[in-house]
Image (cartoon, rainbow, N blue to C red):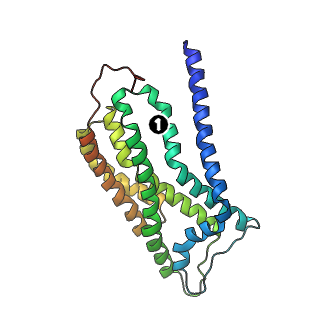
């Protein structure tokens, strides 16, 4: 097969896998849509619990009371479909991998899904209660601390993405070592820079308070160390004579 034909076939496969991933999210979303309001109430629970007695959230947009719960339902649908979405990504790149590298696909898909969900759970159950209670405690006297539901959703999405991606660090480290991009000794050598970078990332992607910054930076550093340990166990792929895309 010529190079142009190969390129087109890759584009067709990429399109098909993207469509499968999108369809999976849409199907799950349609199943969750009737419970959109309940899903938003569950998402807002950490903030509601931190508000003063009688406090509530507000909606400044006419259609916000409808669109925001729908967005939450779509977010939950994406999270539920995430393992299948990640499988489509790995399946697309699998033909270019050696046989021994293909064996890592399923464990990496499972680990990626689990770590992303773990990061979101960490933010929801640990970070949100601490941050919201801190914000409520520093509100000036006479100020009614409330927030618009759309702005709250934007804050939650940003935080979820920050912690979800942060918790993927072990997978990234393992892949980089496995493909030979970086060595374990080099990862140890740059550890001080990673620690500083973790606090910089925490300062950028969290609210402007020290508590939430530390709660992102410390796990990021620890997950980096976990990635080094796991990469040492998995080891770098041998320089096999197997051609990419070989049989299983």
Q: In the picture shown, does residue 233 fall above or below 240?
A: below
The residue that appears at 44% across and 68% down in the rendered structure is 125
| Residue 232 x, y percent position in the rendering | 24, 41
Q: Nearer the viewer, residue 143 or 18?
A: 18
**Split into 4 quadrants, where in the image is the N terminus?**
top right
Q: Is residue 164 left or right of residue 53?
A: left
Q: Is residue 132 left or right of residue 26?
A: left
> As drawn, which residue projects farthest toward the right?
62
Q: In the picture shown, does residue 137 fall above or below 238?
A: below
Q: Is residue 213 left or right of residue 61?
A: left
Whether residue 190 is visible, yes or no, is no
Q: Nearer the viewer, residue 62 or 191?
A: 62
Q: How many marks?
A: 1
Q: In the picture shown, does residue 52 fall above or below 232?
A: below
Whether residue 236 is visible, yes or no, is yes
Q: In the picture shown, does residue 49 fall above or below 174?
A: below
| Residue 123 x, y percent position in the rendering | 45, 64
The residue that appears at 64% across and 49% down in the rendered structure is 26
| Residue 203 x, y percent position in the rendering | 43, 60
| Residue 128 x, y percent position in the rendering | 47, 69
> Which residue is the site of mark 1?
90
**Split into 4 quadrants, where in the image is the C terminus?**
top left
Q: Nearer the viewer, residue 76 or 225?
A: 76
The residue that appears at 25% across and 47% down in the rendered structure is 229
Circle 1 SS class:
helix
The residue that appears at 47% across and 31% down in the rendered structure is 93
Mark 1 packing: few (<14 Cα in 10 Å), some, or many (20+)? some
Q: Quadrant of residue 96?
A: top left
> As drawn, which residue projects farthest toward the top?
2
Q: Quadrant of residue 175?
A: top left
Q: Nearer the viewer, residue 111 or 65?
A: 111
């Amino acid at each position: 097969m010529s190079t142009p034909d190969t390129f087109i076939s890759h584009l067709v496969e990429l399109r098909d896998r993207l469509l499968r991933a999108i369809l999976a999210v849409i199907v799950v979303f349609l199943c969750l849509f009737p419970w959109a309001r309940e899903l938003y109430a569950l998402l807002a629970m950490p903030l509601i619990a931190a508000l003063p007695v009688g406090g509530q959230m507000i909606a400044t947009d006419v259609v916000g009371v409808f669109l925001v719960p729908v967005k939450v339902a779509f977010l939950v649908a994406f999270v539920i479909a995430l393992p299948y979405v990640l499988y489509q990504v790995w399946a697309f790149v699998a033909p270019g991998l050696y046989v021994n590298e293909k064996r890592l696909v399923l464990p990496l898909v499972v680990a990626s899904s689990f770590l992303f969900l773990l990061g979101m759970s960490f933010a929801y159950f640990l970070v949100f209660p601490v941050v919201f209670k801190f914000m409520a405690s520093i509100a000036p006297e006479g100020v009614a601390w409330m927030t618009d539901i759309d702005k709250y959703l934007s804050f939650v999405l940003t935080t979820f993405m920050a912690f979800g991606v942060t918790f993927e660090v072990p997978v990234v480290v393992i892949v980089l070592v496995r493909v030979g991009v970086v060595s374990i000794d080099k990862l140890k050598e740059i550890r001080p820079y990673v620690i500083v970078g973790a606090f910089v990332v925490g300062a950028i992607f969290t609210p402007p308070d020290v508590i939430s910054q530390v709660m992102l930076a410390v796990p990021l550093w620890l997950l980096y160390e976990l990635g080094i340990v796991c990469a040492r166990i998995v080891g770098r792929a041998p320089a096999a004579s197997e051609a990419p895309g070989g049989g299983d």
